[in-house]
């Protein structure tokens, strides 16, 4: 769960999880803290203090398992809210992800490289997937469409892989790349113009997480903070009137970054349900790496930090 704290003199919101990163011999948490200057809201008071900044980012090589959907239709019923457009963003290579990857929807839109570990039937490169869903069965870290699962296999070995059903894998988070494509914003299906606005972002590049979204009337500095509704969807009751500007809070590394669209008006005054609009920007930032002891090698087997 994310906490938003507001300085009393301004409108800039800081977002950070309530759990800190914890290093241990067994694991590293999937959460992170994003401010050097911490603002904590407690009982109506604002307390400012300095604490060391600790980060735990998913760009390490992990071991797990993967399964596949027997039905191709199941892969398109995504909890993130992208619906069938998810296949457009990823050439059909989508994935349902476990709670530690999905993270209550914050992990939606993340890109991962997955490969199975049996050299007799699996390719070394594996397949790149886009997180679009949260599976009911969480026995594996990923559940893939049958066609995407098949891409893990060497030529002529696909049937052997499919017969196994669940296979051992290695995976890592990678930057999402959409050459020549700006990030887009779609008006969510639960919107009700002009009284209720819900948005989700498509073609989110780089290796980042959207931690907060603000909206304001174009030309105004009176930002309204949207609520994380579900999956990749952010919403606001009684949004400002007229054309709207958007502001995203994006976790990208050692400090939280604020991404402001260069367009004064991203959404027109007559925004409509399921319409898609160009933000005019793209994200290319990559999170920094802090790997647990069990995930100290990269995709090619090199040890992180080795000379």
Image (tube, rainbow, N blue to C red):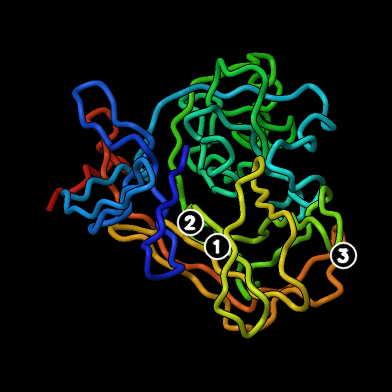
| Camera-side mark, 1 or 3 | 3
- Residue placed farthest to the front in the image? 44
Question: Is the residue marked by circle 3 packed among few (<14), some (14-19), or many (20+) residues within 10 Å?
Answer: some
Task: Name the quadrant containing residue 290.
Answer: top left
Label 2 – label 1 distance at C-alpha: 7 Å
Residue 50 place in picture, x, y as percent: 17, 53
Q: Residue at x 46, y 55 (%)?
A: 207
Badge 1 element: loop
Q: Are marks 2 and 1 in contact (CB under 8 Å)?
A: yes
Viewer-proximal residue among 35 and 38: 38
Residue underneath mark 3: 272
Task: Name the quadrant containing residue 153.
Answer: top right
Residue 165 place in picture, x, y as percent: 65, 16
Above or below — where is 241 with respect to 8?
Answer: below
Residue 143 place in picture, x, y as percent: 64, 27
Viewer-proximal residue among 301 and 290: 290
Viewer-proximal residue among 247 and 207: 247
Q: Which mark is residue 279?
A: none
Of the image marks 1 and 3, the number of the one nearer the N terminus: 1
Above or below — where is 94 with respect to 159?
Answer: below
Task: Name the quadrant containing residue 236.
Answer: bottom right
Q: Residue at x 46, y 60 (%)?
A: 250
Of the image marks 2 and 1, the number of the one nearer the N terminus: 2
Residue underneath mark 1: 205
Q: Are marks 1 and 3 in contact (CB under 8 Å)?
A: no
């Amino acid at each position: 769960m994310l906490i938003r704290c507001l300085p009393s003199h301004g409108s800039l919101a800081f977002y950070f999880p309530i759990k800190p990163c914890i290093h241990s011999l067994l694991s590293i948490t999937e959460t992170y803290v994003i401010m050097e200057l911490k603002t904590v809201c407690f009982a109506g008071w604002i307390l400012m203090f300095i604490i060391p900044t600790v980060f735990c980012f998913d760009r390490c090589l992990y071991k797990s398992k993967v399964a596949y959907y027997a039905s191709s239709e199941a892969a398109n019923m995504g909890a993130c809210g992208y619906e069938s457009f998810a296949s457009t963003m990823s050439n059909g290579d989508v994935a349902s992800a476990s709670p530690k990857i999905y993270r209550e929807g914050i992990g939606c839109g993340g890109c991962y490289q997955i490969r199975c570990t049996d050299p007799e039937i699996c390719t070394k490169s594996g397949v790149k997937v886009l997180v679009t869903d949260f599976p009911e069965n969480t026995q594996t870290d990923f559940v893939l469409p049958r066609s995407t699962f098949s891409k893990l296999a060497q030529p002529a070995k696909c049937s052997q892989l499919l017969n196994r059903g669940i296979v051992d894998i290695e995976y890592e988070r990678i930057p999402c790349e959409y050459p020549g494509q700006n990030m887009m914003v779609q008006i969510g299906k639960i919107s009700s113009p002009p009284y209720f606005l819900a948005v989700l972002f498509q073609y989110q590049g780089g290796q980042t997480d959207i931690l907060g979204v603000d909206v304001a009337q174009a030309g105004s500095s009176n930002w309204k903070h949207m609520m994380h509704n579900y999956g990749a969807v952010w919403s606001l009751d009684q949004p400002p009137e007229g054309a709207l500007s958007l502001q995203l809070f994006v976790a990208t590394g050692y400090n939280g970054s604020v991404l402001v669209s260069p367009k004064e008006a991203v959404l027109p005054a007559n925004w409509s349900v399921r319409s898609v609009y160009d933000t005019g920007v793209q994200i290319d930032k990559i999170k920094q790496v802090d790997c647990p002891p069990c995930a100290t090698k990269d995709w090619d087997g090199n040890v992180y930090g080795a000379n």
